[in-house]
């Protein structure tokens, strides 16, 4: 009897183990009906094929091999990659109700952001509140009110190029950062040496590196590893320290703006509306600070990166700069261009569009997540799948953009759409670029970015020549490598040398005169004395907002 009982348990144990093995063997396999993709290995799927650096290049290669949609099996999870304008329109735009969430991002959201960053939030109540708020304060009509800010900061940037041209990357970052701090918090970032400026970008750069790291990816895919102690996962300790620095920075900006509303010293900024939203929605100061801080980072770094890429392109493709300057000289002559010249500068407008296509920054977008099972092109897309917009592949699709790594503004010479108009175009093949994302998660400030990019490109080319540096040893011109990019949340050009000189003494003097004229509107600390004409200032009862 004991032998029979023992035999029974042995059989049951063997059967259980067999079932377990049968189930485990399916981990990493691509289920039938999923979008195609590269061959998998047991348990790990395609994990071993994801590069540690420049992932967008491998993702583009797979796009050429597998078409408009493919899948990657990452252990027990699935990633669906969209590689065409049509696929992005069909799913992210047209089915936005189920494609507007975000996948779990342990390092990016939990560790580095304390769960507060709007960019990585799932489709939750806080995210919906933030989206409604941002939609209102960054609408097309409201954006017109910020043109005086853009004009002043652009002229400050030109003066920086004139006085210290070797620091051009810092000047571009200060330009976009100061515009964003004014719009968001009501103060100018007056110098590249401003500690708040340096702190913001130090945090952004390091955070981007950690978010894009292989460790972060593994912790998303294998949650049990998150329980490891910090000495085995140093990313957790560093990430929490960065979060505390960032939260303190955002809170200081927000609370100062909030106090300014109470004592009457605040300048027009989005925090006016945010304070009211905070009261109505019951948001904490930390949540409100991160909503405003997210606008700061999104508005500053994306535009700066695109403009750094533009300068690199002018060194690699000098004929483009020459053609642009011919148009500028014909239309503007000795007068500095402004936004009223947009209709008369089609080549400059095309340069702006090509800059957005050529150096999109977020090469693989920001991942979406699908909240219910779906079907597309006969393929099954499971609930919870991570959905990637392969921006790099779309922008470098030979059929869409012949010779894609050539900077060629003539692609857009007859395209008169603003970025927001192109994003809303029912024909996805007519969309100019995908820098600002798609669907309900797309950037709502794209029309502001359009103006900032146009002003920078038109005035830089009007005022300066961009020449290659000559190597003192080889006596040959140094041509930047367009493929030499730093990895992170955004892929940006690594540092490269450039010789930036005024096109004439008259244009250099014009830059000085324009700054001298506009700077009269500033006080001794280089902040606005009064609200510049054209800015919308809602005369709210601030006491009601603060209470």
Image (cartoon, rainbow, N blue to C red):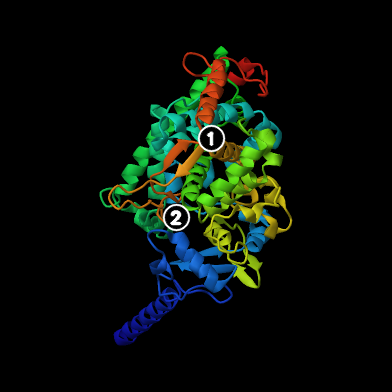
Image coordinates for residue 165, horizontal then vertical, percent = 42, 35
Q: Nearer the viewer, residue 77 or 377?
A: 377
Total marks shown come to 2
Q: Residue 198 placed where, x, y %?
A: 39, 33
Relative vertical location of residue 224 with respect to residue 517 in this rendering, above or below: below
Which mark is on residue 105?
none
Residue 360 visible within the image: no
Residue plotted at (37% across, 78% down) = 17
Residue appearing at x 59%, y 75% in the figure: 33
> Label 1: how many residues lie within 10 Å, few (<14), some (14-19) or many (20+)?
many
Q: Is residue 173 left or right of residue 424?
A: left
The foreground one among 457 and 360 is 457
Q: Residues within 10 Å of mark 2 (few under 14, many from 20)?
A: some
Image coordinates for residue 61, horizontal then vertical, percent? 49, 68
Instruction: Please identify the quadrant where the N terminus is shown.
Output: bottom left
Query: Relative to the observer, which residue lies in front, 21 or 540?
Result: 540
Q: Does any portion of residue 439 appear in the rendered image?
A: yes
Mark nearer the N terminus (1 vs 2): 1
Q: From this viewpoint, which residue is outermost toward the right? A: 426
3D distance between C-alphas at marks 1 and 2? 24 Å
- Compared with 34, 426 (above or below) is above
Secondary structure beneath disc 2?
Answer: loop
Say left or right for 293 vs 41. Answer: right
User: Is 276 left, or right, of 499 in this rendering?
Assistant: right
Q: Toward which corner of the image does residue 48 lie, by quadrant?
A: bottom left
**Which dot marks residue 482?**
2
Residue on which the image places disc 1: 463
Residue 85 in the image: state x and y as whole percent: 64, 60
Identified at 50% across, 29% down, the residue is 505
Q: Quadrant of the C terminus?
A: top right
Nearer the observer: mark 1 or 2; the answer is 1
Corner quadrant of residue 326 = top right
């Amino acid at each position: 009897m004991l032998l029979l009982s023992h035999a029974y348990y042995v059989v049951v144990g063997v059967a259980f183990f067999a079932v377990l093995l049968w189930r485990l063997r399916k981990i990493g396999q691509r289920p039938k009906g999923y979008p195609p993709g590269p061959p998998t290995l047991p348990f790990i799927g395609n994990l071993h094929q994801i590069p540690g650096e420049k992932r967008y290049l491998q993702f583009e290669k797979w796009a050429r091999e597998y078409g408009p949609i493919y899948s990657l099996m990452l252990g027990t999870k699935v990633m669906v990659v969209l590689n065409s304008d049509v696929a992005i329109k069909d799913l992210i735009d047209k089915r936005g109700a189920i494609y507007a969430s975000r996948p779990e991002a342990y390092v990016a959201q939990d560790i580095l952001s304390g769960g507060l960053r709007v960019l990585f939030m799932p489709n939750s109540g806080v995210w919906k509140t933030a989206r409604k708020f941002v939609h209102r304060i960054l609408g097309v009509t409201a954006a017109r009110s910020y043109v005086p800010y853009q004009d002043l900061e652009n002229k400050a940037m030109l003066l920086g190029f004139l006085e210290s041209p070797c620091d051009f990357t810092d000047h571009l970052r200060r330009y976009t950062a100061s515009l964003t701090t004014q719009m968001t918090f009501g103060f100018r970032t007056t110098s590249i040496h401003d500690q708040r400026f340096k702190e913001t970008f130090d945090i952004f750069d390091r955070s981007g590196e950690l978010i894009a790291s292989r460790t972060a990816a593994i912790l998303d895919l294998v949650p049990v590893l998150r329980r490891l102690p910090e000495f085995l996962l140093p990313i957790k300790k560093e990430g929490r320290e960065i979060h505390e620095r960032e939260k303190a920075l955002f809170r200081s900006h927000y609370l100062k703006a909030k106090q300014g509303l109470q004592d009457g010293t605040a300048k027009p900024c989005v925090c006016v509306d945010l304070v009211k939203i905070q009261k109505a929605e019951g948001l904490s100061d930390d949540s409100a600070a991160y909503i405003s801080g997210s606008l700061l980072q999104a508005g500053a770094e994306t535009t700066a990166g695109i403009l750094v890429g533009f300068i690199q392109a002018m060194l690699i493709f000098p004929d483009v700069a020459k053609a642009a300057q011919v148009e500028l000289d014909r239309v503007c002559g000795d007068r500095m261009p402004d936004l009223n010249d947009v209709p008369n500068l089609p080549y400059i407008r095309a340069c702006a569009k090509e800059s957005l296509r050529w150096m999109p920054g977020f090469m693989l977008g920001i991942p979406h997540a699908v909240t219910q099972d779906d079907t597309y092109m006969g393929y099954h897309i499971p609930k919870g799948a991570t959905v990637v917009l392969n921006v790099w592949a779309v922008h470098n699709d030979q059929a869409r953009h012949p010779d894609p790594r050539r900077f060629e503004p003539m692609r857009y010479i007859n395209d008169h759409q603003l970025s927001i108009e192109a994003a809303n175009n029912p024909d996805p093949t007519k969309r100019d670029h995908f820098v600002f994302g798609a669907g309900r998660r797309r950037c709502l400030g794209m029309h502001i970015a359009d103006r900032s990019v146009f002003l920078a490109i038109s005035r830089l080319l009007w005022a300066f020549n961009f020449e290659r540096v000559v190597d003192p040893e080889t006596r040959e011109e140094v041509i930047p490598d367009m493929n030499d990019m730093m990895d992170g949340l955004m892929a940006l050009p690594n540092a490269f040398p450039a010789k930036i000189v005024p096109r004439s003494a008259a244009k250099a003097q014009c830059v000085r005169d324009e700054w001298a004229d506009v700077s009269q509107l500033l006080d001794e600390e280089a902040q606005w004395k009064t609200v510049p004409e054209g800015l919308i200032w809602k005369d709210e009862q601030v006491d009601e907002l603060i209470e």
